Amino acid sequence: MSSEYAKQLGAKLRAIRTQQGLSLHGVEEKSQGRWKAVVVGSYERGDRAVTVQRLAELADFYGVPVQELLPGTTPGGAAEPPPKLVLDLERLAHVPPEKAGPLQRYAATIQSQRGDYNGKVLSIRQDDLRTLAVIYDQSPSVLTEQLITWGVLDADARRAVAHEDA
């Protein structure tokens, strides 16, 4: 395994772990010692080669398909990707349903399609934001401001929308 590939694989492993809100020690605790923090950390840094068997076991532990951990499974080519749009699902649960109902249903559908039930955050795509803007009968930038006001999107999301408008 090339050093660059190992680092890309490690970045994917780290992204999945942090998406689930786990520290390296949290992985060790949750796995009851099956996955040592030092070993997972060395995989994430690309310092240690991971076997296909161990990668499959780690994917199972994280509850994701193995292909989600493999480098090169997302389209490339952009010099710098726009900031991610990350919904705070915990805050969304506290927004009155008459305001957030369509967004809650949309987020639940995405979670179901992805099998992503961490319940804390959900990354959405620019296309999702455009679809939600149609549902809310607002422009994507106006909807983004509304979601920031509700505390559901981070203020950094403005840059993603500005990147889209550029």
Image (spheres, helix red, strand yellow):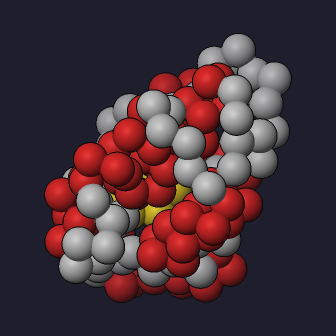
In the picture, residue 111 is in which quadrant?
Answer: bottom right
- Residue at 37% from the left image edge and 51% from the top image edge: 40
Residue 72 locus on image (x, y percent)? 77, 40
Residue closest to the eye, 95 or 5: 5
In the picture, residue 4 is in which quadrant?
Answer: top right
Would you say 126 lies left or right of 89 here?
right
Would you say 95 lies left or right of 63 here?
left
In the picture, residue 100 is in which quadrant?
Answer: bottom left
- Residue at 75% from the left image edge and 22% from the top image edge: 78
Residue 35 locus on image (x, y percent)? 33, 65
Residue 43, relative to residue 158: is it above or below? below
Quadrant of the image containing the C terminus: top right
Residue closest to the eye, 80 or 160: 80
Residue closest to the eye, 162 or 28: 28
Would you say 45 lies left or right of 105 here?
left
Would you say 114 lies left or right of 29 here?
right
Residue 51 in sight: yes
Residue 97, relative to residue 86: is it above or below? below
Residue 107 locus on image (x, y percent)? 53, 74
Residue 101, relative to residue 160: is it above or below? below
- Residue at 50% from the left image edge and 33% from the top image edge: 46
Residue 18 locus on image (x, y percent)? 35, 53
